[in-house]
């Protein structure tokens, strides 16, 4: 049991630190050349954070100096690397110490990450704003808030999801570490100056359950920077007796159950073997992540005559080319909070690629069932949808082609147009 006097001392020290930081915050900013500079920060892999890369590019194109901070495990887009206004600052991806109980290992990693992030953010040119991706929010939200107090910057959180809801997939909702993470995320989340979020449903949740002021939240609905390619299906659909190309992308994490797709493909193989006139399939699942080896082992045990499956990693420049060449997208993302939307579907729609997507709470904000794609709940439904969509493939009379026509006719706002309407005013007016 901890000494009460020691706990009191720590509490007093913590209050003193907070008071000092608040005093620093209230000091006049004074003249400096960094006004307008933005730090776009991710406590994750920059190359696999497309939305934050889009933010950085949009800011740079409108004259802001940008510091893009995060892990460099995967190469960012070439437009990021070539832009003179974007300065990339790499932080190290720390591994968990393999010593002692797991809770000790986790706490040690969080403390080490906090120290590294705090030091790095104090070293960079002073930003007027820090735009932080959440999740992961532990320890990045608290650290960034403290840096903003010291450097008199404004904190903007871009809420992609809740970190505690992702943790609950592994540990369960009642696990103490999940409950602590939820308390932490809601406490520090409401200390931000402004907030972006990916859906209207998340905006409502941030208001109701996190007590974040309504006027500080702006839904920045996912829009793709991709467009339909000339090499896409406008020409290829008329080529007869060719395989259909299915594409899915993933981070190979617990919120995407790829056994649903594998079981649906087994059923599809049976349909073809039973004489139903369906095309052969090439199924490409692209991405990196912790469960990739597990699913590759399952795929290796499957023996198909009419289906080929491959699981490559594609560079950022190659991925839209693959989407533009595909016939159908499949999304297995099942939001841990039910409040975020899969960027993979946004990019598929940007390329006018119809989608079959697994159902969750606010998916209807993006996928309109039987209009631009189909929503399924299990492998049986997905198998039936694949059969129905590909029955008249590749003719223009197929339902698959109808979905593509609907996507072309929808005249979706692109990322840059949407960003200028919803995000730019925050940086221009404050």
Image (cartoon, grey):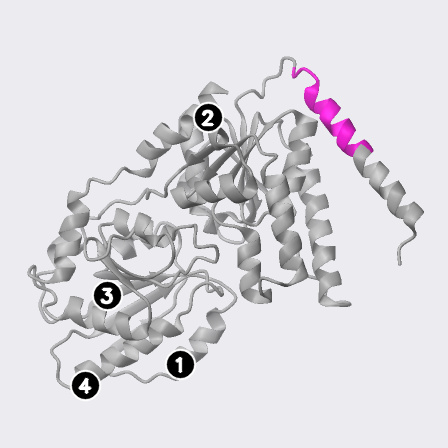
Task: Give the extent of the magenta segment.
Answer: 16-29
Give how far across and how far down residue 168 sits, in percent.
56, 61
Q: Secondary structure at mark 2?
A: helix
Evaluate whether residue 91 shows in this view.
Answer: no
Say which of 279 and 18 sits in front. 18
- Inspect the magenta stretch and tell me whether residue 36 lies in it: no
* Nearest to viewer (mark 3 / mark 4): 4
Read off the residue under disc 4: 273
Dot 2 or dot 3, earlier in sequence:
3
Nearest the camera: 66 or 20? 20
Q: Residues within 10 Å of mark 1 (few under 14, many from 20)?
A: few
- Which of 429/78 is in front? 429
Residue drawn at x 23%, y 54% as measured from the top left = 353
**Residue 372 spot, x, y in % from top left:** 21, 53
Q: Is residue 304 left or right of residue 255?
A: left
Rate crowding at label 2 as few (under 14), some (14 to 19) or many (20 or more) other CA atoms within 10 Å. few
Work out whether mark 1 precedes mark 2 in sequence or the reverse, and give the earlier one.
1
Is 18 magenta? The answer is yes
Image-quadrant location for residue 109:
bottom right
Which residue is disc 1 drawn over?
A: 300
Q: Secondary structure at mark 4?
A: helix
CA distance for labels 2 and 4:
58 Å
Tell us which disc is closer to us: 2 or 3: 2
Decide: is 66 above or below 402.
above
| Residue at the limit of the structure toward the front, as seen here | 208
Mark 2 — residue? 426
User: On residue 245, which mark appears?
Assistant: 3
Report the quarter where the N terminus lies.
bottom right
Lower position in the chain sequence, tag 1 or tag 3: 3
Which residue is depicted at the point 71% across and 39% down? 119
Q: Secondary structure at mark 1?
A: helix
């Amino acid at each position: 049991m901890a000494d009460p006097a020691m706990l009191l001392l720590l509490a007093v020290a913590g209050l003193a630190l907070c008071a000092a930081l608040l005093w620093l915050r209230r000091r006049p900013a004074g003249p400096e050349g960094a006004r307008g500079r933005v730090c776009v920060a991710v406590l994750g892999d920059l190359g696999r954070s497309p939305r934050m890369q889009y933010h950085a590019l949009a800011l740079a194109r409108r004259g802001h100096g940008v510091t893009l901070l995060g892990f460099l495990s995967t190469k960012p887009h070439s437009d990021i690397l070539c832009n003179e206004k974007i300065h990339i600052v790499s932080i190290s991806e720390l591994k968990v110490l393999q010593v002692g109980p797991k809770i000790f290992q986790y706490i040690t990693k969080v403390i080490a990450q906090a120290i590294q992030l705090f030091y790095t953010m104090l070293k960079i040119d002073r930003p007027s704003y820090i735009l932080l991706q959440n999740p992961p929010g532990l320890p990045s939200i608290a650290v960034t808030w403290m840096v903003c107090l010291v450097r008199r910057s404004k904190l903007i959180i871009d809420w992609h999801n809740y970190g505690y809801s992702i943790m609950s997939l592994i540990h369960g909702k009642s696990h103490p570490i999940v409950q602590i993470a939820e308390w932490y995320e809601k406490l520090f989340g409401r200390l931000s100056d402004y907030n972006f979020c990916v859906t209207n449903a998340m905006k409502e949740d941030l208001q109701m359950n996190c007590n974040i002021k309504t006027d500080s939240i702006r839904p920045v609905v996912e829009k793709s920077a991709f467009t339909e390619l000339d090499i896409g299906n406008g020409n290829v659909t008329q080529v007869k007796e060719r395989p259909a190309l299915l594409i899915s992308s993933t981070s190979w994490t617990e919120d995407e159950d790829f056994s649903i797709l594998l079981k649906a493909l087994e059923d599809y193989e049976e349909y073809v073997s039973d004489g139903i006139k369906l095309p052969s399939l090439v199924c490409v699942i692209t991405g990196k992540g912790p469960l990739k080896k597990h699913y590759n082992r399952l795929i290796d045990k499957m023996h198909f005559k009419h289906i080929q499956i491959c699981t490559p990693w594609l560079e950022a420049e190659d991925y839209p080319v693959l989407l533009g060449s595909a016939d159908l997208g499949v999304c297995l993302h099942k939001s841990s909070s039910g409040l975020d939307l899969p960027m993979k579907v946004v990019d598929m729609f940007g390329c006018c690629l119809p989608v079959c997507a697994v159902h969750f709470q606010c998916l209807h904000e993006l996928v309109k069932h039987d209009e631009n794609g189909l929503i399924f709940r299990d492998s049986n439904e997905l198998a039936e949808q694949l059969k129905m969509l590909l029955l008249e493939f590749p003719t223009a009379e197929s339902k698959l082609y109808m979905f593509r026509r609907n996507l072309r006719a929808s005249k979706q706002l692109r990322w840059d147009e949407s960003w200028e309407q919803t995000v730019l005013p925050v940086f221009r007016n404050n």
